[in-house]
Image (cartoon, grey):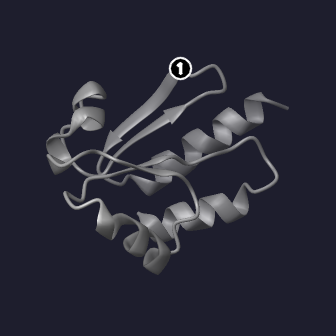
Amino acid sequence: MIPHERSLVEKHADEPFAIVGVNSDKEREKIAAACEKQGISWPSFWNGPDGSRGPISSTWEVEGWPTLYILDGKGVIRYKSVGANVPEIDQTIEKLLSELQ
């Protein structure tokens, strides 16, 4: 998903759009290097030493990786996907952005 996420950030640079990631690496020291290597320019939070069973994924009820949530400007979850359904993700983003016009 990272290449697609990077393209979304570029495509929607002038729009009210943001990506926030959660990193499930167990070793925090590796995150910065991985983000730099993969060109991740958006915030990516550490899920803690328990990796995929950390506090963020537990709170958000993540059942598999990747799990994507799309929230509107009011913080309402408008879409959730376990796995990368790129066409649905893109369609949902476009729909939400069009609602702002």
Tell whether 36 sits left or right of 30.
Answer: right
Q: Is residue 37 above or below residue 27?
A: below
- Residue at 63% of width from left, 46% of height from top? 18
**Of the pair 99 and 24, the residue shown nearer to us:** 24
Residue at position x 31%, y 69% in the image: 30
Q: Could you say where residue 78 lies in the image, as x and y percent from the top left?
A: 50, 26
Please tell me which residue lies in front, 1 or 41. 41
In the rendered structure, the answer to whether residue 12 lies left or right of residue 40 reads right
Q: Position of residue 79 (x, y in %)?
A: 45, 32
What residue is shown at x 31% (from left), y 66% (from top)? 29
83 relative position to 44: left or right: left
Q: Is residue 17 above or below residue 39?
A: above
* Callout 1 amino acid: Val
* Residue positioned most to the front: 29
Is disc 1 surrounded by few (<14), some (14 to 19) or many (20+) residues within 10 Å? few
Residue 13: percent from left, percent from top = 75, 57
Q: Which residue is mark 1?
A: 76
Image quarter where the C terminus lies is top right
